Amino acid sequence: MPERLAEETVASADRTVPCRVVVCRDCCCGTVKVDADHAAQTARLREIAPVRISECLDVCEQANVVVVQPSTAGRAAGARPVWLGLVNDRDATEDIADWVRAGGPGVAPRPDILDLYLIEPPRRTPTPS
Ligand code: FES
């Protein structure tokens, strides 16, 4: 491979962002207000994808809130971040993990079971970067 092409290929790969997960952990999510194993949930998701812990995402009534962010390929396919609420049990976490492992929004079809957890982002959307 010509040296310039090799450099461009590396640069292109550097711009590729995988599917990522934002886990809210603030005043409600991740606290005793929610009956869930928060540490286990975060650890499990970290086995699958990069996870960022967020401050309050302004939908506390839906705690625990998880936002699945599309990969570069998912965004190119038109996907947007998917907000999920009441993610408080191990099965829900596993369903999210399976979807993320498969490629997440825009790459893999969302498992039907996750429709139960879909929520609307708040009108003033905090940035779950
Ligand atoms: S603490 Fe998670 S939405 Fe408020």
Image (cartoon, rainbow, N blue to C red):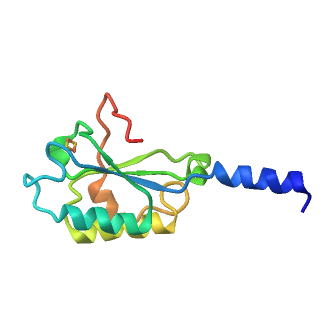
Q: Is residue 128 above or below residue 107?
A: above
Q: Position of residue 111 (x, y in %)?
A: 40, 66
Please tell me how many numbered marks the rendered image carries.
Answer: 0
At x 37% / y 41%, what residue is drawn? Answer: 128
Quadrant for residue 5, please give it: bottom right
Judged from this view, the residue extending furthest toward the left is 33
Q: Is residue 12 visible?
A: yes
Q: Is residue 119 above or below residue 13?
A: above
Is 76 situated left or right of 56 in this image? right
Judged from this view, the residue extending furthest toward the right is 2
Q: Is residue 96 visible?
A: no
Q: Position of residue 16 (x, y in %)?
A: 62, 52
At x 79% / y 50%, what residue is drawn? Answer: 8
- Nearest the eye: 117 or 93: 93
Quadrant for residue 1, please give it: bottom right
Is 48 situated left or right of 25 in this image? right
Is 36 situated left or right of 94 in this image? left
Question: From the image, which quarter does the C terminus lie in?
Answer: top left
At x 54% / y 54%, what residue is drawn? Answer: 106
- Nearest the eye: 126 or 10: 10
Is 20 situated left or right of 112 in this image? right
The quarter of the image that holds ligand 1 is top left
Q: Position of residue 104 (x, y in %)?
A: 48, 59
Q: Position of residue 58 (x, y in %)?
A: 23, 36
